[in-house]
Image (cartoon, rainbow, N blue to C red):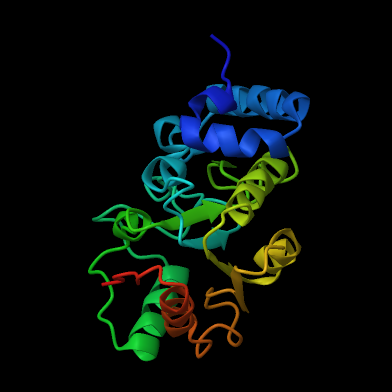
């Protein structure tokens, strides 16, 4: 049976994203992704492709953190931006995120790189491109994923409740134009990669997320 990305999406996300999607383009993307998985290896594993959407429903999304594309080394990507499973070495970008968390809020970061606990609290850990060929970063860029995940961003923008959009790095920051509803908050900073020596560390995103959510009566995230 042919791969159908819309059918793989949780129903709640399918309902809110579909109005923002070109269905012919999505079918073409489905065919591309199916062929790439068949040729393999592609990350994340297909069963983890929509982990972010499974763990964080549209109605419960309070924060959206946008990455670019998945980790491209075996055993790393599992469907959440910046996250790796327990037992996998914490990647350098995530180490900087953890450093900023400690410096900003004084919070001891998680002991591993698994961010499913954040996702379960309404943090949508989304990448702009959701698959990658092993060993080849950005290999699945410009194949249709960008329009697909833009539809997710637009669906979250439609939320009547405040969402904090966290855009790190020049690629993610281009998506700020998709956030148009005035109740939302957009936080922009440099990418947390160690190759970007300035622009992220010291940006204090976590305290700003906390203030924005509390101001809207949406509670707060337990980051530890």
* Above or below: residue 102 compared with residue 160: below
Residue 91's spot in the image, x, y percent? 41, 65
Residue 104's spot in the image, x, y percent? 40, 88
Determine whether, in the image, residue 4 is placed left or right of residue 141.
left
Q: Residue at x 71, y 39 (%)?
A: 20
Determine whether, in the image, residue 59 is placed left or right of residue 137.
left
* Above or below: residue 166 compared with residue 208: above
Residue 56's spot in the image, x, y percent? 41, 48
Q: Residue at x 31, y 71 (%)?
A: 223
Image quarter of residue 221: bottom left
Determine whether, in the image, residue 216 is placed left or right of residue 101.
right
Q: Nearer the viewer, residue 133 or 115?
A: 115
Residue 39 visible? The answer is no
| Quarter that holds the C terminus | bottom left
Instruction: Name the outermost residue toward the top.
Output: 1
Determine whether, in the image, residue 210 is placed left or right of residue 37.
left
Residue 33's spot in the image, x, y percent? 61, 29
Q: Nearer the viewer, residue 89 or 189?
A: 189
């Amino acid at each position: 049976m042919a791969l159908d990305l819309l059918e793989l999406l949780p129903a709640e996300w399918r309902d809110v994203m579909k109005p923002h999607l070109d269905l012919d383009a999505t079918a073409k993307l489905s065919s591309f992704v199916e062929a790439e998985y068949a040729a393999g290896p592609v990350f994340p594993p297909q069963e983890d492709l929509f982990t972010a959407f499974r763990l964080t429903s549209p109605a419960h999304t309070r924060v959206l953190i946008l990455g670019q594309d998945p980790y491209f080394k075996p055993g790393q990507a599992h469907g959440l931006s910046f996250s790796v499973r327990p037992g996998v070495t914490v990647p350098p970008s995530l180490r900087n995120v953890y450093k900023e968390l400690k410096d900003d809020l004084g919070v001891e970061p998680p002991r591993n790189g698994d961010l499913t606990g954040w996702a379960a609290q309404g943090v949508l850990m989304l990448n702009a491109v959701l698959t990658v060929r092993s060993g080849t970063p950005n290999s699945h860029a410009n194949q249709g994923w960008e329009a697909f995940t833009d539809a997710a961003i637009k669906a979250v923008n439609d939320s009547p409740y405040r969402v904090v959009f966290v855009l790190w790095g020049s690629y993610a920051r281009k998506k700020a134009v998709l956030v148009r509803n005035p109740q939302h908050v957009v936080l922009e900073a440099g990418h947390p990669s160690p190759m970007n020596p300035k622009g992220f560390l010291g940006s204090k995103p976590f305290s700003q997320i906390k203030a924005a959510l509390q101001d809207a009566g949406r509670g707060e995230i337990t980051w530890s």
